[in-house]
Amino acid sequence: MQEYEDNKRLFFALWPDEGVRRQLHELIPQSLSRPTSAQNIHITLVFLGDISSAVLAQLTHCIDTLKSPSFTFTIDRYGWWRGPGVYWVGPRDVPQPMLQLFESIRSCAVKAGISLDSRSFKPHATLARKVRQRPRARHTFNIHWQVNRFVLVESMQGEGGVEYCVLREWALGEW
Ligand code: ATP
Ligand code: MG
């Protein structure tokens, strides 16, 4: 595929506020390899891949029309994906408004001509990568996350690894 210079690697995400970010970061066991840095912790809603500014303009036009409610959920479980060695935390219960938000963003992306992979939505925050052994069961935790906005993020390769830059945010309301 031809690479265009103005393409950006983009994704939509839930971006924790400082309090939730700190609590999530505190869940990372000291011993794990490749821990996610505190400022990078997030939940991906829809991963877009490399997107041109023209396609992005079309996409954000659609996103601007969405009317989605704010919601809360609880981070209360952890898991491990053997292949990539991803250690993650996420909610046992995924609230309906989160699923609807995912579907709405997805349909805007499809309308803008972006091809998405068909993996099902498994909301999670990656806390470490390349973890080669299943982490031992941890104490239980309940982190309450009030979601009042979602964001569009650019993923960039920095000198010290991946860096995420929030480009825009959209408020969720009481619809
Ligand atoms: P990862 O190691 O999890 O891929 P990363 O730090 O390398 O993350 P990116 O690859 O730019 O950064 O990914 C940005 C975000 O989008 C991450 O949350 C990542 O897990 C997620 N992501 C990347 N590729 C996909 C994909 N094909 N489908 C769904 N989510 C994806
Ligand atoms: Mg990646």
Image (spheres, rainbow, N blue to C red):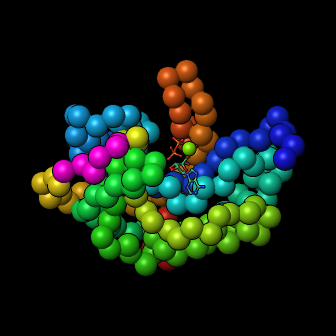
In this view, the residue farthest toward the top is 159
Answer whether residue 168 is visible to the viewer in this image.
no
- Where is 79 relative to 42, above or below? below
The spot of residue 41 in percent (x, y) is: 40, 44
x 49%, y 64%: residue: 172
Quadrant housing residue 104: bottom right
x 77%, y 69%: residue: 111
Answer whether residue 118 is visible to the viewer in this image.
yes
- Where is 16 relative to 159, above or below? below
Q: Which region is colored magenta?
A: 131-136
The spot of residue 123 in percent (x, y) is: 43, 63
**Is residue 59 located in the magenta-colored stretch of the structure?**
no
x 35%, y 42%: residue: 131
x 79%, y 59%: residue: 58
Query: Which sits in the foreground, 89 or 173?
Result: 89
**Is residue 134 located in the magenta-colored stretch of the structure?**
yes
The spot of residue 99 in percent (x, y) is: 48, 74
In this view, the residue farthest toward the right is 2
